[in-house]
């Protein structure tokens, strides 16, 4: 079993950079363009790792260790996630809280890295990031609590195997609402379109991109990689919930899971193609709406 | 049947939340129209199979008035008054959405303190009814525009209706139709009043109706 | 026969919307009012048979309130015809802001007035909780256009508040009606009847918790319409901004109808053995209403608003009398009659003063006795009657309520009651006496040369009735009051 768990972690580490590639491909397809190849991010990272980094005189050591530490945090988060019926490498009661904290730690490191540059521009991005995540994080916790109550288990590796097709029959509306809230949080946390536009370089509207403007070389590669892994984390939370195929056979489960991740990336791509970015003032409203749905779901499962 | 009714009731709760959190009148009116249709479905759902002529007439009346006639009337009033959005209510949209969400546990808590009403009633019915009533009251007290207050009145009325169709079996059709007719005329008269207010004052902000006070 | 009571004003009201000649429409109004009064008088001699499977039936309580409504409407009709004759069609002068405004078409006014009567009649006739609700909500809708007869901004504001607050209140009363049905549901039966008589018969079987909850909602809902503090906020606006003839009906008849609906709920609670719960609530709200009215009456410059607050006070006395139980219930029934007659008379006289002086501010009016001798005298008599001074009717009924409080040992309640009555007497005396006496504040050229018969006859008749009731209550009325009180568990 340990081997299988290790394998699924390696799978995540290797395949995660494909997700942004799929999203971009879908967007290009909808727009009628060819678009970059799916493996574009691998090329970018490889190129960046071969380059040297440029550091501004005003930065301190915080700026240097932030990208690597952020990457470390998200990798630890990945070790907590199960795939289908395959347990995670680390599993203990309450690990869902650790997951939320690791994601928070990663965000904190990105933010202090951005603040360390001393640029007012990056400070603005950091403030927005913190403002929105202050609303997104409670929603994530609410969905986790609702799932834990539904499965009557406090560990992610206990919760996800317990969600089966039968659970959907019994508590379909609640699970659907949890999924919707989780999708909204995924979009907000990963700087996807209704909240932030990963492709924009218009200063006043950027959130995530503006924070990483000053990073270069391997540091930037780490940041891109960490972002892809974070998307994988949210993707697997959502896919495990929405595709409750539990055959018991590790290979079949993982296959279904990978298909689900592909679907997840496609859905995000479609959302990005069809929706416009929300005005900054409307973003909190959307997150509060997601929170409201999560609370309703929680109340329903508590009943 | 039970799961199906539950789904409809949950949708009613979500439409309530949408009413609390949305600012555009047009969207709110459409949400309310959808809620009217849901109300018809609830009426069918709680009857447990035996669809009498009585029920069908009632459902047709509910869907026709709440799903079709009211939206038309209200959209017309909105057009006449020339305003499309609620502006800065006394309680912000995000806050009222939050209050509206917290009203759900409150409704559940209230229900748990009431005596049981028998196995035939879906367990979610009474909380949903209370929730709609609370949302209606919230809209009435926290919004400035006369149109939204009417929307709040209708949400309140819907909540009471859910309570009625769920718990009161075999009331007289005459009376049920009378109730629907009354609500219809009420909205009609309110629509006329909104029209007069917008003409007389050039706005429909009810907080600026303050000539009469001590 | 029962149906005719409702149908005559309802059909006449619908017809009034389409009849064009003023003369014919006014004759129709008068005819309907007379026919209604005649049918009501007939019901005194012989109780009418129920109709529509008991949906429409007339018991003692219903007859009492129906008679009040019918009598007031008759008086208001005579007054109203005179009033409509003097209103120039389509224009008017706003006393408050000096702006011109238009009047609503007379056909709409007359039609709504008759429908208003029909719906109030239906409230008194209905033996079914649901139908009661339907009729009560319909009174709101029928009377809203009446308040907006003078189409200016203040009356529009009053209309909006009235419509919205009362509709919301009455919606809550509907929840109360449904809760009554839930309380009456027992698992063995599939159908629930909301007929008053059957619910009273099954009193013991009803679920107490649901029933108490139902009464709370009924009290809040119909209490809004009745003007119990703290739900009275719409009342001073609506009653002061509507034409005086409408104010008289709103204060004198409509508040009673709402009270009747609460009494219906009370009857069920009493049958189930929960009367004490209802009585505590009624005493509390009654005292609260009297207190709120006392606070707002003192220093009130607008005399029509003062009359409106006085209605809140008297509604409080009704609730208090009901809440005290025993002789208090008889006192409340008698007071309902006295208050309606007195308040209607005062509002009609207020209309005369307003027409002569063109102001609603009490300070600007002096010497009403010189300018309008009859109206001035009636104004003074009305003031004495409404503040509970002998020898007028309200003195008798207010005294009965006081005696009930003392007999049952509610000393604090009795002290508060007297204190509020005293405050209100002082508050009203200042304005009323100054308006009546002194030199005429109108220049001689603007004084009306005479008072028209139609404007003084109805209030005079009402005033004489109040005076008679203070000295001697006729035997049939006394009998009816006792029977109504005993139907509510009093004596």
Image (spheres, grey):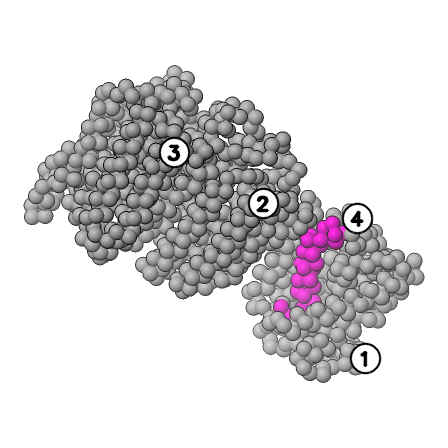
- The residue positioned 26% from the left and 53% from the top of the image is C105
Left or right of B67 in this view: C136: left
Residue range corresponding to the magenta coloring:
A167-194
Q: Which residue is mark 3?
A: C125
Q: Which residue is mark 1?
A: A46
Q: Which residue is mark 4?
A: A153
Left or right of B115 in this view: C16: left
Q: Mark 1 or mark 4: which comes first in sequence?
A: 1
C249 or C282: which is nearer to us?
A: C249
Image position of C199 with respect to B95: above or below: above
- Which chain contains the residue that carries disc 2? B
Q: Secondary structure at mark 2?
A: loop
Q: Which residue is mark 2?
A: B52
Q: Is residue B174 magenta?
A: no
Left or right of A238 in this view: C106: left
Q: x, y percentage for residue C232? A: 38, 40
Separation of residues labelled 3 and 4 (CA atoms): 62 Å
Left or right of A79 in this view: C173: left
Separation of residues labelled 2 and 3 (CA atoms): 30 Å
Image position of C110 with respect to A285: above or below: above
């Amino acid at each position: 079993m340990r081997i299988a768990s290790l394998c699924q972690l390696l799978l995540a580490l290797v395949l995660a950079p494909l997700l942004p590639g799929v999203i971009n491909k879908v967007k290009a397809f909808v727009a009628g363009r060819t678009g970059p190849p799916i493996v574009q991010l691998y090329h970018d990272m490889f190129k960046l790792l071969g380059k040297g980094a440029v550091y501004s005189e005003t930065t301190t050591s915080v700026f240097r260790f932030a990208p690597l530490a952020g990457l470390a945090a998200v990798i630890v988060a990945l070790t907590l996630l199960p795939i289908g019926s395959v347990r995670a490498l680390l599993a203990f009661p309450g690990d869902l809280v650790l997951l939320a904290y690791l994601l928070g730690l990663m965000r904190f490191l990105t933010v202090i890295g951005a603040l360390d540059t001393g640029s007012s521009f990056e400070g603005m991005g950091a403030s927005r990031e913190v403002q929105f995540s202050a609303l997104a994080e409670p929603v994530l916790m609410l969905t986790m609590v609702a799932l834990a109550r539904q499965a009557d288990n406090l560990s992610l590796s206990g919760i996800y195997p317990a969600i089966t097709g039968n659970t959907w029959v019994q508590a379909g509306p609640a699970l659907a609402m949890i999924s919707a809230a989780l999708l909204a949080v995924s979009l907000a946390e990963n700087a996807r379109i209704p909240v932030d536009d990963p492709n924009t370089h218009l200063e006043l509207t950027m959130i995530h991109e503006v924070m990483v403007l000053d990073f270069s070389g391997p540091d930037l590669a780490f940041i891109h990689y960490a972002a892809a892994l974070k998307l994988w984390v949210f993707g697997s939370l959502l896919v495990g919930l929405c595709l409750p195929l539990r055959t018991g056979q590790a290979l079949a489960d993982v296959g279904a899971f990978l298909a689900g991740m592909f679907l997840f990336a496609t859905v995000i791509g479609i959302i990005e193609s069809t929706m416009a970015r929300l005005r900054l003032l409307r973003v909190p409203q959307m997150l509060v709406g997601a929170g409201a749905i999560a609370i309703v779901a929680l109340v329903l499962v508590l009943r | 049947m039970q799961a199906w009714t539950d789904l409809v009731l949950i949708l009613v709760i979500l439409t309530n939340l949408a009413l609390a959190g949305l600012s555009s009148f047009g969207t709110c009116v459409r949400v309310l129209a959808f809620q009217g249709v849901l109300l018809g479905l609830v009426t069918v759902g709680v009857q447990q199979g035996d669809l009498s002529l009585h029920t069908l007439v009632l459902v047709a009346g509910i869907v026709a008035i709440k799903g079709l006639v009211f939206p038309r009337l209200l959209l017309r009033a909105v057009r006449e008054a020339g305003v499309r959005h609620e502006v800065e209510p006394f309680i912000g949209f995000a806050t009222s959405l939050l209050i509206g969400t917290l009203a759900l546990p409150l409704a559940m808590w209230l229900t748990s303190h009431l005596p049981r009403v028998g196995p035939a009633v879906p367990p979610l019915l009474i909380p949903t009814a209370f929730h709609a009533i609370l949302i209606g009251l919230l809209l009435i007290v926290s919004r400035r525009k006369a149109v939204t207050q009417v929307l709040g009145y209708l949400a309140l009325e819907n909540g009471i209706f859910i309570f009625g169709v769920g718990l009161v079996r075999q009331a007289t059709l005459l009376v049920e139709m009378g109730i629907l007719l009354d609500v219809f005329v009420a909205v009609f008269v309110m629509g006329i009043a909104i029209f007069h207010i917008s003409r007389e004052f050039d706005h429909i902000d009810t907080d600026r109706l303050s000539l009469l006070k001590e | 026969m029962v149906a005719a009571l409702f149908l005559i004003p309802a059909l006449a009201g619908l017809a009034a919307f389409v009849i064009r000649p003023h003369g014919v429409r006014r004759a129709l109004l008068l005819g309907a009012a007379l026919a209604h009064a005649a049918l009501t008088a007939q019901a005194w001699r012989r109780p009418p048979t129920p109709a529509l499977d008991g949906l429409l039936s007339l018991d003692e309580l219903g007859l009492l309130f129906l008679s009040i409504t019918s009598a007031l409407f008759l008086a208001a009709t005579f007054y109203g015809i005179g009033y409509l004759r003097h209103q120039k069609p389509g224009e008017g002068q706003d006393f408050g802001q000096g702006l011109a405004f238009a009047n609503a078409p007379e056909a709409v006014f007359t039609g709504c007035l008759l429908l208003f009567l029909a719906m109030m009649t239906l409230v008194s006739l209905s033996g079914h909780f649901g139908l009661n609700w339907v009729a009560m909500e319909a009174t709101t809708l029928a009377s809203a256009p009446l308040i907006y007869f003078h189409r200016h901004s203040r009356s529009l504001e009053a209309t909006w508040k009235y419509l919205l607050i009362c509709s919301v209140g009455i919606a809550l009363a509907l929840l109360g009606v449904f809760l009554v049905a839930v309380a009456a549901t027992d698992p063995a039966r599939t159908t629930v009847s909301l007929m008053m008589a059957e619910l009273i018969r099954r009193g013991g079987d009803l679920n107490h918790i649901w029933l108490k909850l139902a009464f709370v909602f009924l009290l809040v809902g119909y209490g809004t319409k009745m003007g119990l503090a703290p739900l009275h906020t719409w009342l001073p606006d609506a009653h002061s901004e509507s034409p005086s003839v409408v104010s008289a009906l709103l204060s004198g008849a409509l508040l009673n109808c709402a009270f009747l609906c609460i009494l219906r709920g009370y009857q069920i609670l009493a049958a189930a053995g929960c009367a004490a719960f209802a009585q505590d609530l009624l005493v509390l709200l009654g005292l609260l209403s009297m207190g709120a009215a006392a606070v707002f009456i003192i220093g009130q410059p607008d005399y029509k608003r003062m009359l409106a607050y006085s209605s809140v006070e008297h509604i409080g006395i009704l609730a208090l009398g009901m809440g005290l139980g025993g002789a208090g219930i008889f006192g409340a029934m008698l007071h309902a009659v006295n208050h309606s007659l007195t308040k209607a008379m005062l509002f009609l006289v207020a209309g005369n003063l307003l027409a002569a002086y063109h102001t609603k501010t009490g300070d600007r009016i002096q010497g009403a006795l010189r300018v309008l001798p009859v109206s001035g005298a009636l104004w003074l008599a009305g003031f004495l009657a409404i503040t509970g001074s002998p020898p007028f009717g309200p003195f008798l009924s207010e005294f009965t309520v006081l005696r009930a409080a003392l007999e049952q040992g509610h000393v604090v309640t009795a002290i508060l009651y007297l204190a509020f009555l005293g405050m209100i007497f002082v508050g009203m005396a200042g304005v009323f006496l100054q308006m009546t006496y002194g030199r005429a504040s109108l220049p001689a050229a603007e004084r009306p040369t005479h008072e028209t018969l139609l404007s003084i006859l109805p209030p005079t008749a009402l005033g004489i009735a109040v005076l008679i009731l203070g000295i001697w209550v006729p035997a049939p009325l006394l009998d009816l009051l006792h029977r109504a009180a005993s139907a509510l568990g009093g004596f």
